[in-house]
Image (cartoon, rainbow, N blue to C red):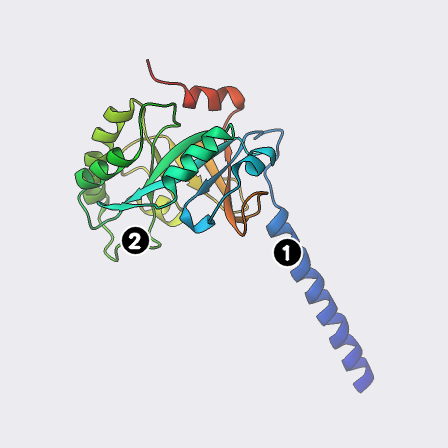
């Protein structure tokens, strides 16, 4: 009897190991159907360290959204270098701003506009709305909408393009449909978003790309290369 118990315990342990290995393999190798979503991109900040953008571009990456600013005065220290080298490597590039709940939207707009150049082609500006790493107080939809409008107005005027709003799952559940109506960038890890009105889909937060040491966020574009070209094109 004891031998049977030991045997079945070993079998159970082996099955658990197989399941865990399978789950980890699925997690690290997951990628949306390339037939439906052929355009792949990444979003980065100084957390990715020194990036070899030519190797990134050679690894089936077509666009990069790069952190520029946060709040009313913070500037990502790697932004200028990342923007310059990603563009030189042939990627379509854009900039994003991490929107804090404890600074006026107008101040945050001034910060973003002062840092991001508008004399070269860029993908639409992105405003990142999420709870992780943000100020502890969560504004009501009405409060957030007022400050967000104060940010979007100057930014869209400066860059001549409609901004894109990035929402995590939690932020989407809290604010979607109640704040400024803009094209969306949705975060839905390993599962396709349950809505289809998005421009970018962030499907992985621990992806791997040649040229970057460690984890990086992976995204796809809704549409093909012509959509990416349209987003990058200067507004008449």
Real-space CA distance between mark 1 and mark 2, rounded to the nearest whole angstrom: 31 Å
Q: Quadrant of the N terminus?
A: bottom right
The residue that mark 2 highlights is 134
Q: Quadrant of the C terminus?
A: top left
Q: Is residue 148 in sight in this rendering?
A: no
Residue at x 51%, y 27% (from the top left corner) = 90
Residue at (38% x, 26% y) in the render: 122
| Label 1: few (<14), some (14–19) or many (≥20) C-alpha neighbours in 10 Å | few
- Indicate left or right for 32 with 127 as reference: right
Disc number placed over residue 23 in the picture, else none: 1
Q: Are marks 1 and 2 in contact (CB under 8 Å)?
A: no
Secondary structure beneath label 1 = helix
Which of labels 1 and 2 is toward the front?
A: 2
Mark 1 or mark 2, earlier in chain? 1
Q: Can you give x and y, in whole percent of width and height, for residue 192 in the image?
A: 52, 40
What label sits on residue 78 in the rendered view?
none
Left or right side of 76 for 44:
right
Q: Is 127 located above or below residue 11 in the figure?
A: above
Residue nearest the viewer, comparing 74 with 33: 74
């Amino acid at each position: 009897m004891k031998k049977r118990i030991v045997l079945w315990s070993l079998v159970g342990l082996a099955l658990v190991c197989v399941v865990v290995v399978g789950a980890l393999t699925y997690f690290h190798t997951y990628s949306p159907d390339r037939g439906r979503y052929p355009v792949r991109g990444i979003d980065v900040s100084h957390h990715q360290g020194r990036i070899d953008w030519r190797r990134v571009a050679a690894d089936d990456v077509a666009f990069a959204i790069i952190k520029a600013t946060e709040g009313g005065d913070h500037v990502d220290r790697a932004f200028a270098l990342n923007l310059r080298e990603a563009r030189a490597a042939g990627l379509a590039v854009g900039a994003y701003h991490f929107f804090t709940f404890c600074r006026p939207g107008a101040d945050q707009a001034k910060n973003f506009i002062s840092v991001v150049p508008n004399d070269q082609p860029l993908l639409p500006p992105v405003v990142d709305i999420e709870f992780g790493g943000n100020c502890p107080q969560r504004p009501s939809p009405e409060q957030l909408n007022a400050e967000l409008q104060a940010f979007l107005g100057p930014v869209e005027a400066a860059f001549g393009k409609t901004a894109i709003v990035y929402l995590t799952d939690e932020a989407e559940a809290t604010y979607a449909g109640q704040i400024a109506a803009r094209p969306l960038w949705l975060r839905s890890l390993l599962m396709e978003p349950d809505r289809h009105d998005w421009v970018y889909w962030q499907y992985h937060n621990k992806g791997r790309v040649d040229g970057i040491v460690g984890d990086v966020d992976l995204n796809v574009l809704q549409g093909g290369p012509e959509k990416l070209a349209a987003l990058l094109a200067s507004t008449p």
